[in-house]
Image (cartoon, rainbow, N blue to C red):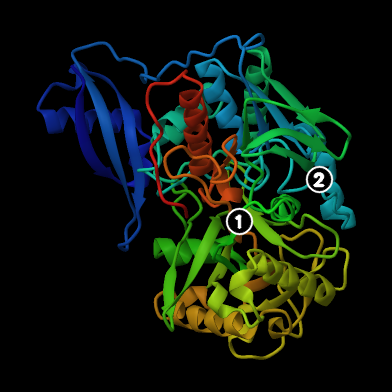
Amino acid sequence: MPQTIQIRVKPAEAGTDLFLKQLISQQKGVPLNSVQGYTILKKSIDARGKTPWVNLTLQAFINEPVEKRLLRTFSFKDVSKASKQAIIIGAGPAGLFAALRLIEGGIKPIILERGKDVRARRRDLAAMNREGVVNPDSNYCFGEGGAGTYSDGKLYTRSQKRGDVNRILELFVHFGADERILYESHPHIGTNKLPHVITHMREAILGFGGEIHFEQCINELKIAGEKLTAVCTKQGESYSGDAYILATGHSARDIFELLHQNKLEIEAKPFALGVRVEHPQELIDKTQYHGEVRDPFLPPAAYTWVEQVNGKGVFSFCMCPGGIIAPAATAPGELVVNGWSPSKRNNPYANSGIVVSVELADLKTKNKTKDPLSLLRFQQEVEQTAFKAGGGNLQAPAQRLIDFCENRSSTNLPPCSYVPGIVPVNLKEILPLFIQERLQLGFKQVAQKMKRYYTNEAVLVATESRTSSPVRIPRDPEKLHHPQISTLYPCGEGAGYAGGIVSAAMDGERVAVAILHQCGLATTLPLAVPSV
């Protein structure tokens, strides 16, 4: 029977098969030739001390044949002629994983995606980077796979109690992701590889009888009493089903407007807004690994930090080692930035969002608590101000880190990975005062802990504003449908119930199981969880 052991090794030793077998034989007191092999169950890096270590949990095979990693199997059904069908609005992780779960349960999914497939989507991303042209329906946020497809594919989540994380990761592996995501502490697929995984998911959904319709943007809801009976698109199509899953992501502002116009309950939700900071990766490596040269067996270093400033959170978000800053606007006339890394994380810069919590109490507008779109309007105004300050064409306002904290303008800027280009702007012209002041204090507090981090070699690029949805769509805590519409199931980041690829995928599955239960095709209800 395989035995589980935990070991602590140096980075170079972690990838040496013979060395690990020797450690297993020593720890278990058995001859080396009796150790037939092992499987890595968990892997993490501990760089808190002067010498980085790799912690490994291994499943060792002693005097028995090595078994491959045991992965669950998925039983997808032919739903081409299913009697029940669900309309899924959005082909991000929530929508795709909901579709796969419905297929397992015997319901036909029909996905409506406003954007394009992953391949065609690339041309619109190239136009954003090179020409500053924003396609409102095909960009870094909209299109097959959702926002995560071309902004990194990070799979780390703290949502362990919200569903079966391992099931989500194993589904990714089933569709072509590397098995390393099953045991690494911060799994990451990479923007260069995730589109291929998403393509395989689409092929499976279609192969088992589901439908996917691209470039179909919802602009009308047909409601009869307490039921949604059909959705219509700008392209003149109408779709009807037994249930409707709303999985449009955190940037579908027109959908929030559409719900509001139809007098369906939505509410303002706190989110976070700030800047994206970029350092030379070499500097972050020195800071995190406590040395002048990064061990070649260590990956480019990452970091996270959280500071409390006058009772409010200032924190890093979506940190990208060896990454690139990208334009993430979803409409002309706004400036939004995000970050991503390729699978090898081998670019010369490290970037991260540094953001401040924004709540209704922070706004100065009248009747702010009565308008469920008030935080969305605030978010939009900051993005539009940044666009104007950058001079148009998606050039981004930027300022050196210490200059920003010391309230002085930057006369020049360091090199930056942001392709449309950065221009020197004092960010106090863009950021609301409460955000500016909290960011300044947050950076100064971090400077006491990460001294090399606080440098004018780092540049702040505005604005990092799409951290999460500024709107929540309420739903019944048990049946998961909208409280006013029994056939409408809000889910994922856009509805306020997820905060990343994995948590959105889990929420999509959770809603799918609720629909299966409602249709008499499932015996257990999904786990009810609070919103985020």
- Density class for disc 1 (Cα within 10 Å; few <14, some 14-19, many ≥20) is many
From the viewer's perspective, tell me whether residue 59 is left or right of residue 88. Answer: left
Residue to which mark 1 is pinned: 266
Closest to the observer: 203 or 44?
A: 203
Out of 20 and 305, give the one closest to the viewer: 305
Does 107 appear above or below 313? Answer: above
Q: In the image, what residue type sits under mark 1? A: Ile
Position in image of residue 63 (x %, y %) = 18, 13
Q: Position of residue 200 (x, y in %)?
A: 64, 23
Asked if labels 2 and 1 touch by Cβ distance under 8 angstroms, the answer is no
> Mark 1: which secondary structure?
loop
Give the residue displayed 47% in from the left and 65% down from the top.
286
Q: Residues within 10 Å of mark 2 (few under 14, many from 20)?
A: many
Question: Which element is circle 2 on?
Answer: loop
Q: Amino acid at mark 2?
A: Asp
Residue plotted at (44% across, 52% down): 295
**Quadrant showing the N terminus:** top left
Residue toward you, 404 or 479: 479
Q: Is residue 178 visible?
A: no
Residue 491 lies in quadrant: top right
Q: CA distance from mark 1 to mark 2?
A: 23 Å
Residue 66 position in % (x across, y down): 30, 15
Please identify the quarter of the rendering in which residue 349 is found: bottom right
The label number, if any, that marks residue 378 in the structure image:
none
Q: Position of residue 345 (x, y in %)?
A: 58, 48
Q: Which residue is mark 2?
A: 137
Please name the residue shown 79% across and 39% down the image: 121
- In the figure, is residue 106 to the left or right of 381? left
